[in-house]
Amino acid sequence: MNRKRRNTCAIAVIATALALTTACSNTGTTNNGPAAQPPAAETNTNSPSTETPVIDPNAKYDPPIEISTVRYTDSSFRFPDGDSIDNNVWTRAYESELGIQVKNLWVVNGDQYNQKMNLSIASKELPDLFMVDAKQFRELAEAGQLEDLTPLVEQYGSELTKEMIERGTNAKSAATYDGKLLAIPPAEDYYGGAPLLWVRTDWLDKLNLPEPKTMDDLLTIAEAFTTGDPDGDGQNNSYGLAASKDLIGGYPDLSGFMNGYHAYMNIWIKDESGKLVNGSVQPEMKTALGKLQEMYKSGQIDKEFGVKDGGKAAELQTAGKVGMSFGAMWNPLWPLQDSVTNDPNAEWGAFPIPSADGTPASAQSKADFNSFWVVKKGAAHPEAIIKLFNLYNDKIVSEQADPANFHSKDGFEYFKYALLSNGFGTPQGLLSVHKNVIAAVAAEDPSGLVPEEKSYYDNIQLYLGGDRAQWGTNKVFGENGSWAVIGANYADQNLLKKSEFYGAPTPGMTEKQAILDKLVLETFTKIILGAPIDSFDSFVSDWHKLGGEQITNEVNEWYADKS
Amino acid sequence: MFRARFKRQLPLHLMVVPSFLLVLVFSYGPIGGLVIAFQKFSIVKGMFDSEFVGLANFEYMFALPDIWLVIRNTVVIAGMKIVAGLAVPIVVALLLNELRARVFKRWIQTLIYLPHFLSWIILGGILIDILSPSGGIVNQLLGVFGIEPIYFLGSTSWFPGVVVISDVWKEFGFSTIVYLAALTGINPALYEAAVIDGANRWKQTLHITIPGMLPIVVLLATLSLGNVLNAGFDQIFNLYSPQVYETGDIIDTLVYRLGLEQAQYALATAVGLLKSVVSLVMISGSYYLAYRYANYRIF
């Protein structure tokens, strides 16, 4: 590709024998003559009128500079004809608006990125600008191989960039090492993973049951769904609650059930004394597991859940055999949409986590900060990362955003091509999308919507017009959908239990987390399947012995250092 | 004399050079990377600057709480697979060899060979369905004989057996082909002579067919003993679940969770090295025994 361009240039030069090097000047190596003409300056918001050379954060590089980076793509990356990860709307914008030529040292498939990155780190062939995971970030930070971005954000960051960096306090703290901001903080999304309760509301109506307000309601409903023949086929073949062998995860997520008993699986919570403790080994968990055991024993949970993964569990639920499940906000799109498509009567309702006692239940959520855009120590233009992020925010987030050209259009997801695209989203996350869409649906006026919101609006209109294939979108963004419940409960009433630990894995975690995960999963599964509930007590002491105590201490040290 | 022969063979030597280089670069070169098994490996420092810790990674591995259980599972499952993986294809090959209708023989050969091409990720999903105690076809069949449904994949006592049987089912067609090939190599004159001497089918099999295929059996047995610590990662990873960890968790799945999910490359390398050493010992040992008692040599 490079050689081709050089050849074309060479031929052009020989053929015309003219020193019009403009065609070649974009290689950036020769800038003898024509570079004198400055390109029309971009909109200078803070115009430098003072005599001293002030830094203009928006200045275009002239001559253009080259920034090396590394990328990944996957099957979801689709490009319009002629475009590629090396040449697309974003790379062209970087060059024309910022004077930055992005050079991809390598591009791999998404699932190989981390390994390839490890290789690059190990062989010390770091690009100028790259993305790392939490563990790589910590290793590089400890080895002093990353550029401090703190002053650069001050000098070059636009208002919006600063806002985006500040928007998630935990994310910012995860991107900070030794008091220095070493990475653009990733998006902080605690709502997207929080469990909701999904209930077949048409079954509720059929069996004359109330909506689940408490855990007792939930248990009653689960029993009725199991024994009351809600699917009306005369057979005792339905289940109350969905479960899978992983116990928790986006779907089906038993952590929602545990949260009803104020038990929080695998996250770090604060105890009364203000210390961080692991939710899996707290006494509340014993109660929750006991209830699950009762449900399993009485046939309200699939007898074979212990060998099924989420996909297998979904088969049962979409076949109309399961009446309740806990899961994340995207569950209506998958798997519930399939249930609605299969059965014209099926209708699912979203509910906040019911509580077992007077205290409202909080949904657990953990944000894994695992993608950090960083700059190699000693890069020629470390400030370029801020300029690139400015541009990103300008095109995607700001009032003057240009989503049709830079976000997505006609099925092409342009935003994926962008560098730093994990800074995606507004401070409110999809909650604001939901609010805008709801308002537009109420007013029947989509004119104020950005294209992403407009596409949801259109789908919701289709659903309201009777198209059940769009049920999922409506249930996520529309009235009484996921985000409505999240907004009214988890956001407005603050009923969200965030994991208090969000640093890179501690040494103890690296060594022992796998052992502990196995212990937790094995013990919990066995208890649900009928092992004596008191085995929980010996489990707790085993957990501490096998490394849990060490990890707890490390997590508390991290917590003390952070504040 | 030597020069003349070398000159004649030169083109052949040249043809070997590329593959020789490839083996050198991709098989022998990476052996140097084994050094990280003795290091506290940090990706930032790389394999040249990481701190040496001697056998600490091995000590850590053998100090893991479940390690002996996991080693036992591995050896039990791998051992059963080795035995069944040898016996079943030999018997099938002998039986197929007796079939007169060639078309029928070809059909069977192809059909039993097919599962070899399916990946475990697909078979995992299929097995969960057909072995389900509530609606799986296997348990429905057993129900016809009045047998209570068996929770094959959820029971600690059944799980290793299911793993071995499904693995044999998947692979026996492939090994059968190897034995059938060995059978075609037996000189037909031997059979004719045996018939003249009055040997029946059974005697022919016993005195001609089996001795005729013995070298290849010994070869495959010798090689398969190297697998004594390989219980089949991709199969078990797709079939196991927390409730059968007790009899189903093997070294490879443990190392996957420890070494890759937690990015402990040094540990993963140490375990890999350990497995290779055990394989080497087993293969050398069995080769020596085969040479000593069956007078069989590969080299």
Image (spheres, helix red, strand yellow):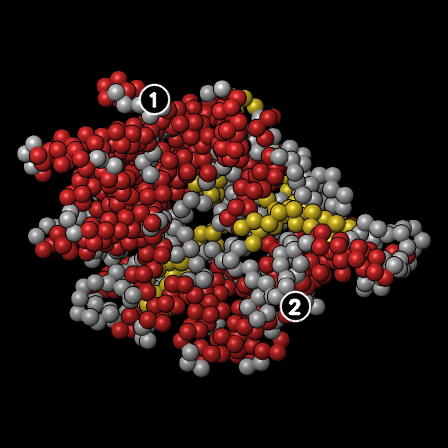
Q: Which residue is mark 1?
A: B284
Viewer can see residue A185:
yes
Disc 1 residue type?
A: Ser
Q: Residue at x 62, y 47 (%)?
A: A106
x and y percentages locating residue B44 in the rendered image: 60, 33
Disc 2 residue type?
A: Asn
Picture quarter with the C terminus of chain A = top right
* Front residue of this view, candidates A502 and B80: B80
* Front residue of this view, candidates B70 and B19: B19
Q: Is residue A16 left or right of residue A111?
A: right
- Under circle 1, the secondary element is helix
Q: Residues within 10 Å of mark 2 (few under 14, many from 20)?
A: some
Distance (Cα) linking label 1 and label 2: 65 Å
Q: Which residue is mark 2?
A: A405
| Disc 1 and disc 2 in contact, CB within 8 angstroms | no
x and y percentages locating residue A304 in the rendered image: 25, 52
x and y percentages locating residue B16 in the rendered image: 50, 33
Above or below, B286 relative to B134: above
Q: Residue furthest right?
A: A51
- Under circle 2, the secondary element is helix
Viewer can see residue A160:
no
Q: Residue at x 71, y 55 (%)?
A: A4
